[in-house]
Amino acid sequence: MIGRYLLRFGALGYLGVVLLAPVALIFWRTFEHGWHPFWAAISNPDAVHALKLTLEVTLIAVPLNTVFGILCGLAIVRHRLPAMGLVNALVDLPLALSPVVVGLALILVYGPGGWLHGLPFKVLFSFPAILLATMFVSLPFVVREVVPVLREIGTDQEEAAATLGASSFATFRRITLPAIRWAVAYGVVLTMARSLGEFGAVSVVSGNVVGHTQTLTLYVQDAYANQFNETGAYSASVLLALLAIATLLLMTMFRPKEETRGDRGA
């Protein structure tokens, strides 16, 4: 009995120290003088542009990685194509590779002397580089949510639909996609959170030009470390946290109650 309570309180204490206390402190520091400093900090032109750029990148990266994740998951589980084992391993590369290394790799590819340096449009230190870096670091999450669910549900219903004459697209739309919809939803939430919070790779390839290529995470770093604007840094951090929390709450609200108690792929 004592061991059970020690385990519970130990886990809760660990979460409190590592996760809850730092986040709570940021919220307290942001609002300790009221709402007005927070609003003034996030409504200045540089912060607004950084937020817009972050949302634009996220709104492009998340759908692209979602489509890729579903197709890649189907290829890994349903279609035993050559080299799929290698693809399955490479999908995890962004989880193991430092984001700073990702940014450096993009510079080597698209920078002076790189393989793709001669493109007719600018990549580095502009929107395309930020998008590529964000897509790279957030690529694995949908795949990693979809693959185990596809393996668990098996192929019986899909084979039955094919026997009855359903096309591949109809089978996917009516059987496969409904079965993996919550796995996809979890993957989208993780992808969105990673896209909103990306810093390392973006800091290398964006140039961090205020009002042009500065995302909200870069704005936090610049405000805190360079401008000594703690209120601005705390307010932007809270805004990022609120965006992530809102995403989780929306997914929870729209998920049917009977499915919240089941498996995420049910």
Image (cartoon, helix red, strand yellow):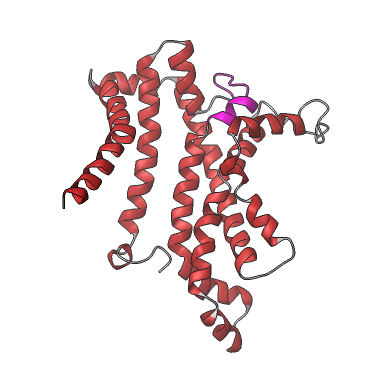
Give the residue drawn at x 29%, y 22%: 30
Q: Does residue 49 sit above or below 168 in this rendering? A: above
Residue 200 located within the stretch drawn in magenta: yes
Q: Does residue 7 sit above or below 168 in this rendering? A: above
Query: Looking at the picture, how far across and down is residue 180, in whole percent?
Result: 48, 66
Give the residue drawn at x 83%, y 32%: 118
Query: Looking at the picture, how far across and down is residue 168, in whole percent?
Result: 63, 76
Q: Nearer the viewer, residue 85 or 225?
A: 85
Q: Nearer the viewer, residue 213 or 241?
A: 241
Q: Nearer the viewer, residue 162 or 11?
A: 11
Q: Which residues are magenta?
A: 199-212
Query: Looking at the picture, how far across and down is residue 21, in whole percent?
Result: 28, 30
Residue 198 located within the stretch drawn in magenta: no
Query: Looking at the picture, how far across and down is residue 12, in whole percent?
Result: 25, 42
Q: Does residue 23 sit above or below 219 in this rendering? A: below
Q: Quarter of the image holding residue 163?
A: bottom right
